[in-house]
Image (cartoon, rainbow, N blue to C red):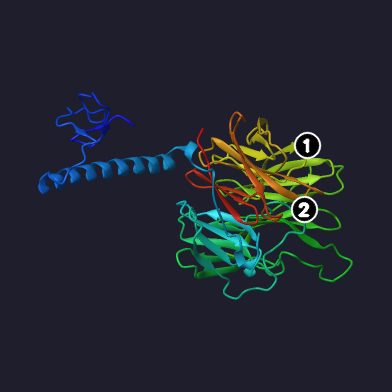
């Protein structure tokens, strides 16, 4: 049998026998109360009630304090938190694995997602609970679903973005034959306006014998839409930049190949800089891959650098000074390599944290014929390339178009990863 405890008359804490002062509040243990001193019926009723109340208050206070402390630790101590918090949008539009793009609201409270179903409807979610808040639908749904590229690949174009003030959502919707940028009120999901962009996929005027155009990449931000096109026969690429509000083209970019002997060149990646005025074009030939940075308002090339191996990932640092191409970070001004991030399996997407101190990479492996079925999420120190953490995503849905796309929350505490659905991860600080 355990030794009787002595309860403090000030805070109710249970102290070991022989203690002169309370271990919790340091008050003198006057009127020592043993846990074996159970009140008897002969004790006056008023005294029994007083002591019982004191014991109840003390026990309740201790329980509340302990419970509150444990809740506090679970909310603040990374070692007690599960890195993967929840999964949502699993059956968007009635189709499993349909989410193609996602974007955080500027305040980090909501998430907008778009799927390859529902003719381009955008869903708005509570970011940390997964509760669906509203649905933004097309005023007149356009048959044919969302735009798809002629060359399929991971994270193949930014489809949905928020306005800087968080009041509106913009999405690139409709088939390639008749695409539009639609704007909704984020508070109620009501359509505000629609902007027909252009007929992105065109045929020669005579219908035969001419050179046909195809769309190979696009990128949307809150002001502009950039669309990469290529002539099928000649292989010549160019990029059109459209002002969304005006619905007019502001410039045409003409990327030139650094390899004069290359027979064909394709721009398969467009990524907007943080200032939303510059873009990087990722283009490739049979001799390798290169990147060009352009000022979209002037239509002039700012800088270019070449990367030997093929990649489809490009990501800007928040300050716009560095560019990740694949798992290598380059200095934008000089074009020199500054950091390499070593990743297991095949990387699909990379993103800087909002403070620029960390980099997250989603990578996948396949079981047969390299169909991606198992995922990993790695976090690196952005400047040194040292791996800080690695998370096992487990088995994932096959959804090539949006697979592996990463989106950091504005405060850098959470990460969204698309695997057909939306996975919310808590990013541990190390």
Distance between mark 2 and mark 1 Cα atoms: 20 Å
Mark 1, residue position: 308
Image x and y of residue 331, in percent: 63, 33
Classify residue 271 as left or right of residue 31.
right
Image x and y of residue 82, in percent: 52, 43
Among the two numbered marks 2 and 1 on one chain, the one whose residue lies closer to the N terminus:
2
Mark 2, residue position: 237
Residue 244 visible from this viewpoint: no
Image x and y of residue 379, in percent: 59, 37
Q: In the figure, residue 103 lies in which quadrant?
A: bottom right
Which dot, 2 or 1, sits closer to the camera?
A: 1
Image x and y of residue 123, in percent: 55, 63
Q: In the figure, residue 232 lies in which quadrant?
A: bottom right
Classify residue 77 as left or right of residue 288.
left
Q: Nearer the viewer, residue 122 or 142?
A: 122
Instruction: Residue at 86%, 65% (x, y): give it.
Output: 210
Instruction: Residue at 27%, 27% (x, y): give it.
Output: 16
From this viewpoint, which residue is outermost toward the right?
209
* Vertical side of 210 occupied by 322: above or below: above
Q: Nearer the viewer, residue 115 or 259?
A: 115
The crowding category of the residue bearing disc 1, from other C-alpha atoms within 10 Å (few below 14, some 14 to 19, many at least 20), is few
Tags 2 and 1 in contact by the CB under 8 Å rule? no
From this viewpoint, which residue is outermost toward the bottom?
140
Q: In the figure, residue 120 lies in which quadrant?
A: bottom right
């Amino acid at each position: 049998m355990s030794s009787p405890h002595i309860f403090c008359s000030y805070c109710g804490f249970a102290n070991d026998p022989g203690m002169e002062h309370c271990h919790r509040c340091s008050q003198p243990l006057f009127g020592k109360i043993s846990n074996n001193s159970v009140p008897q019926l002969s004790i006056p009723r008023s005294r029994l009630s007083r002591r019982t109340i004191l014991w109840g208050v003390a026990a309740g206070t201790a329980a509340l304090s302990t419970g509150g402390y444990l809740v506090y630790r679970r909310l603040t101590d990374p070692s007690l938190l599960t890195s993967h918090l929840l999964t949502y949008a699993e059956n968007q539009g009635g189709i499993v694995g349909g989410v193609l793009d996602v974007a955080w609201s500027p305040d980090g409270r909501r998430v907008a997602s778009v799927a390859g179903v529902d003719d381009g409807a955008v869903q708005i979610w509570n970011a940390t609970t997964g509760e669906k808040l509203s649905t933004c639908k097309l005023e007149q749904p356009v048959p044919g679903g969302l735009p798809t590229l002629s060359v399929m690949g991971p994270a193949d174009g930014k489809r949905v973005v928020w306005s800087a003030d968080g009041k509106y959502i913009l999405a690139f919707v409709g088939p390639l034959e008749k695409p539009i940028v639609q704007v909704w009120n984020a508070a109620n999901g009501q359509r505000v306006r629609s902007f027909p962009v252009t007929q992105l996929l065109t045929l020669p005027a005579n219908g035969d014998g001419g050179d046909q155009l195809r769309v190979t990449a696009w990128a949307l931000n809150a002001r502009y839409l950039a669309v990469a096109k290529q002539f099928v026969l000649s292989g010549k690429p160019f990029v059109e930049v459209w002002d969304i509000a005006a619905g007019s083209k502001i410039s045409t970019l003409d990327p030139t190949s650094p390899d004069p002997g290359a027979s064909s060149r394709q721009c398969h990646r467009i990524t907007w800089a943080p200032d939303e005025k510059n873009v990087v074009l990722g283009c490739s030939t049979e001799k390798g891959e290169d990147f060009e940075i352009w000022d979209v308002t002037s239509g002039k090339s700012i800088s270019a650098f070449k990367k030997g191996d093929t990649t489809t990932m490009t990501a800007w640092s928040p300050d716009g000074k560095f560019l990740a191409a694949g798992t290598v970070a380059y200095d934008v001004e000089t074009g020199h390599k500054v950091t390499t991030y070593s990743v297991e399996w095949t990387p699909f997407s990379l993103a800087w944290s909002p403070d620029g101190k960390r980099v997250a990479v989603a990578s996948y492996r396949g079981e047969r014929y390299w169909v991606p079925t198992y995922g990993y999420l790695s976090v690196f120190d952005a400047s040194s390339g040292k791996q800080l953490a690695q998370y096992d995503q487990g088995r994932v849905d096959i959804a090539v178009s949006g697979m592996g796309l990463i989106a950091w929350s504005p405060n850098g505490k959470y990460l969204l990863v698309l695997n057909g659905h939306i996975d919310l991860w808590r990013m541990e600080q190390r």
